[in-house]
Image (tube, rainbow, N blue to C red):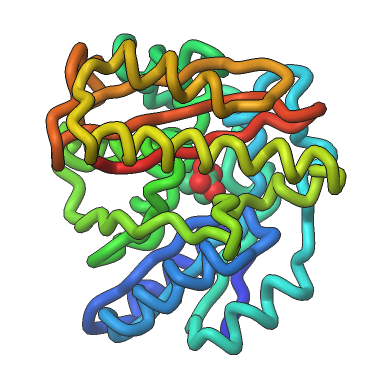
């Protein structure tokens, strides 16, 4: 497996490749969720490239940038075993310069829900994803549905800027008890982990309500709140696939999203219904 730390070295390598390229951008601390994206890419492309970069511009002042888990040795082993051909792991200085061009998230869809609670987060996320897509020029890039609004905005960027990459959405990977995998789960104490489970339980409850005929978003949200046991609820929202709020669930076209704090950890989860 090749390892690159500069954009120039990665570009030289990329120019030598023919055939389809699958790309999995990550911030490292790889878990089974990332591994499922990598497996998808390896199965459907001639070459798979993974990036590992904790992108500072998508963290807000006071967020967990400094303590974000970094496990580079373990990550490289996982990539190698999964059949990755090259890993790109730049330093911040290698991919950013002080007075650079900025690509900004759309002012409406980039500033609701996650974007409202983490203003500027999507500007930084899209800036790095655009750089990475330009460097790797992948045939396909793989993103988890857990970051549903991120996935939507990346699809929108690819569409609006005519990027020649297919964005492949991948299913959320959960622990057996339902907890959605996240690199941030390691912050949870045992008791917090039990309360964190109430996010997926609330989503499951919403699905049951919908199966039994309930469609009113507000009624579903109120019921979900009864299931949650969290320290602070940022939002529960029911939106369509374009992130427009829905008064009533439209089956097969809706996403139910939750963001909440358990102890000092902010968790997100969602279900596509
Ligand atoms: O989802 C992530 O891990 C990050 O937001 C991404 C897409 C790698 C950009 O830094």
- Where 7 sits versus 58, above or below? below
Inspect this view and state whether residue 100 appears. no
Classify residue 240 by image quadrant: top left
x 44%, y 41%: residue: 147
- The foreground one among 5 and 45 is 45
In x, y percent, where is residue 230?
69, 24
Residue positioned 75% across, 35% down in the render: 65
The quarter of the picture where residue 64 lies is top right
Give the image location of residue 208, x and y in percent: 33, 40
- Looking at the image, residue 118 lies above or below residue 197: above
Residue ID at (60%, 30%): 57
Apparent side of residue 196 relative to residue 107 in the rendered image (left or right): right
Whether residue 20 sits left or right of residue 251 in the image: it is right
The C terminus, quarter of image: top left
Nearest the eye: 7 or 264:
264
Which residue: 53% across, 64% down? Answer: 34
- x then y, percent, for residue 168: 27, 58
């Amino acid at each position: 497996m090749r390892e690159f730390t500069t954009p120039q070295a990665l570009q030289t390598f990329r120019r030598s490749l023919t055939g389809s390229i699958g790309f999995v951008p990550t911030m490292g601390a790889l878990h089974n969720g990332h591994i499922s994206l990598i497996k998808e890419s390896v199965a459907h492309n001639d070459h798979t490239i993974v990036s590992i970069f904790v992108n500072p511009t998508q963290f807000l002042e006071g967020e967990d940038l400094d303590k974000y888990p970094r496990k580079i040795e373990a990550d490289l082993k996982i990539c190698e075993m999964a059949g990755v051909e090259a890993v790109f792991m730049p330093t911040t200085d290698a991919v950013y310069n002080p007075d650079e061009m900025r690509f900004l998230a759309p002012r409406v869809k980039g500033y609701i829900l996650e974007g409202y609670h983490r203003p500027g987060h999507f500007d930084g996320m899209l800036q790095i994803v655009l750089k990475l897509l330009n460097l790797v020029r992948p045939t396909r890039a793989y993103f988890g549905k857990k970051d549903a609004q991120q996935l939507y905005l990346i699809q929108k960027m690819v569409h609006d800027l005519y990027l020649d990459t297919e964005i492949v959405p991948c299913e959320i990977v959960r622990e057996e008890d339902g907890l959605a995998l996240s690199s941030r789960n390691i912050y949870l104490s045992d008791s917090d982990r039990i309360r964190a489970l109430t996010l997926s339980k609330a989503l499951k409850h919403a699905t049951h309500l919908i199966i039994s005929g309930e469609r009113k978003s507000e009624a579903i949200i109120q019921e979900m709140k009864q299931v949650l046991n969290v320290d602070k609820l940022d939002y529960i929202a029911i939106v369509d696939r374009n992130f427009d709020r829905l008064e009533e669930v439209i089956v097969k076209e809706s996403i139910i999203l939750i963001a909440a704090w358990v102890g000092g950890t902010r968790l997100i989860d969602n279900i596509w219904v």
